[in-house]
Image: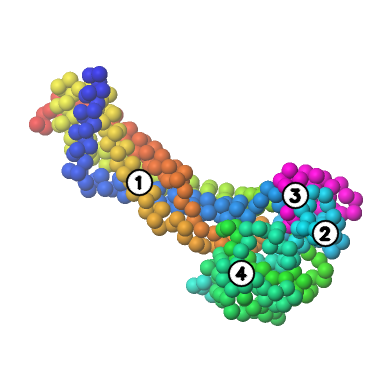
């Protein structure tokens, strides 16, 4: 109990004197806050990108591509392939109509808002049944396009990030002209970056004959997937791969998310080293200016462990304050910020919003406390080893 009482008393004394060293303490707080802002903001990019990709998938939908294709861009299906796919067991049907949409996927150049630099924006040709396959689809502005025409609808993410996509605008791509008649949303999924049109009109515009790249199918249930996949992959008439939609998009997001997280942690580690040195200098200054107080306390019988704990507590308090400030600033500045980036699997843009989640804030605060602990350790040991006679001579 005597040790606990001593430790609390010395720690409270240290914390009460922080305002007297506000200049040096501010250096440590600002340095740690800066590191937390960078760490949380960079990781929020990966979090937002992954969320946009993963929200696209559904356990009860299957994506069918040519065997060996690693993305929609490298896949190719014939009309015969599509007909066979729509005969597979486990596929949901509305009467005699299979709830599956054969789709074509192309890239068109549209400048980003605020710049004249062209960006690769995906345009998807769909069938009328596509809105039943993707039941999260809804029109938020204008109306749905009419099949058999050059009308298109654009995702709200595309509208927010790229030029000339408002309702009533005209899109020019090569020799093709498209009329924007509506804006849609799909619960924040990657599809909101796309422009949708009639797949047969898109085939004619890009001279694709009667070919497609993927079929997106809604299953009777998520448990129907194995039966649906096995029937298609063992059918000698076709050469296909079948994946759950959620698995496909999770794999699509993995490479870029890993790259962003690696860069974020690398930057944070490098900046953290600088912040640790800042904390060390701050705490050495604190120990130096309070050398007489520390020596007096030890001369009165306070043990060295209490002194070490008190110095570490001060360093952790400064780090926690810096971490909290950095987390709040990162949340205010970046959470929900809309942007787009390249999906390296399809070489097309993906619109998404930064997500500063509670987990990222906890991670940032934890990293701040680690920096504070390391930054206060050596000054704490110096305070404990401070020769009492030498320090008391300064009285």
Count residues near mark 4 (Cα–Cα under 10 Å), then give few for <14, some for 14-19, many for 20+: many
Q: For residue 363, which quarter of the picture?
A: top left
Residue 145 higher or lower than 99, as above or below: below
Tell me the element at label 2.
loop
Residue positioned most to the top = 1
Task: Measure the alpha-carbon separation of dots 4 and 1.
Answer: 40 Å
Vertical placement of residue 222 versus 293, above or below = below
| Label 3 – label 1 distance at C-alpha | 48 Å
Q: CA distance from mark 4 to mark 2?
A: 30 Å
For this rendering, which residue is in front, 302 or 162? 162
How far is disc 2 from disc 1 in space, using C-alphas?
59 Å
Crowding around mark 2 (Cα neighbors within 10 Å: few <14, some 14 to 19, many 20+) is few
- Residue range corresponding to the magenta coloring: 215-243
Percent of width and height locating residue 44: 49, 52
Q: In the rendered image, which residue does mark 4 sit on?
A: 154
Q: As drawn, is 364 to the left or to the right of 383?
A: right
Q: Is residue 236 magenta?
A: yes
Q: Which residue is mark 3?
A: 220
- Taking the spot 71% from the left edge, 52% from the top edge, the residue there is 61
Q: Could you tell me residue 393's position as x and y percent?
A: 11, 29
Look at 34% across and 49% down and name the residue there. 325
The answer to which of marks 3 and 2 sits earlier in the sequence is: 2
Residue with the mark numbered 1: 324
- Read off the residue under disc 2: 96
Q: Is residue 145 visible?
A: yes
């Amino acid at each position: 109990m005597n040790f606990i009482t001593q430790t609390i008393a010395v720690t409270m004394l240290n914390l009460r004197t922080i305002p007297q060293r506000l200049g040096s303490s501010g250096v440590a707080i600002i340095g740690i806050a800066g590191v937390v802002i960078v760490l949380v903001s960079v990781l929020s990019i990966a979090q937002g990108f992954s969320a946009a990709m993963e929200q696209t998938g559904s356990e009860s939908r299957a994506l069918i591509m040519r065997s060996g294709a690693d993305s929609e861009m490298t896949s190719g299906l014939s009309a015969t392939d599509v007909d066979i796919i729509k005969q597979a067991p486990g596929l949901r049907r509305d009467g005699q109509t299979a709830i599956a949409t054969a789709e074509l996927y192309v890239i068109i150049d549209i400048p980003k808002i605020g710049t004249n630099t062209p960006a690769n924006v995906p345009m998807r040709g769909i069938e009328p049944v596509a809105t039943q396959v993707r039941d999260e689809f809804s029109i938020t502005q204008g109306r749905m396009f009419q099949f058999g025409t050059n009308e298109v609808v654009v995702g709200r993410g595309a509208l927010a990030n790229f030029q000339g996509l408002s309702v009533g605008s005209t899109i020019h791509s090569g020799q093709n002209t498209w009329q924007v008649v509506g804006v849609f949303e799909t619960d924040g999924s990657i599809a909101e970056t796309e422009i949708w049109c009639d797949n047969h009109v898109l085939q004619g515009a890009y001279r694709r004959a009667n070919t497609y790249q993927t079929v997106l199918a809604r299953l009777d249930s998520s448990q129907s997937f194995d039966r649906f996949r096995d029937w298609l992959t063992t059918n000698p008439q076709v050469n296909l791969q079948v994946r759950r939609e959620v698995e496909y998009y999770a794999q699509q997001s993995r490479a870029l998310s890993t790259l962003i997280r690696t860069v974020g942690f690398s930057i944070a580690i490098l900046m953290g080293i600088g912040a640790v040195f800042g904390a060390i200098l701050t705490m050495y200054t604190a120990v130096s200016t309070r050398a007489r107080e520390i020596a007096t306390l030890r001369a009165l019988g306070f043990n060295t462990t209490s002194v070490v704990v008190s110095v570490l507590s001060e360093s952790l308090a400064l780090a926690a304050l810096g971490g909290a400030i950095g987390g709040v600033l990162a949340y205010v500045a970046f959470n929900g910020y809309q942007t787009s980036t390249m999906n390296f699997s399809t070489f097309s843009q993906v619109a998404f919003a930064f997500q500063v989640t509670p987990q990222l804030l906890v991670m940032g605060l934890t990293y701040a406390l680690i920096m504070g602990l390391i930054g206060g350790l050596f000054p704490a040991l110096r305070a404990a080893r401070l020769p009492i006679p030498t320090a008391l001579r300064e009285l």
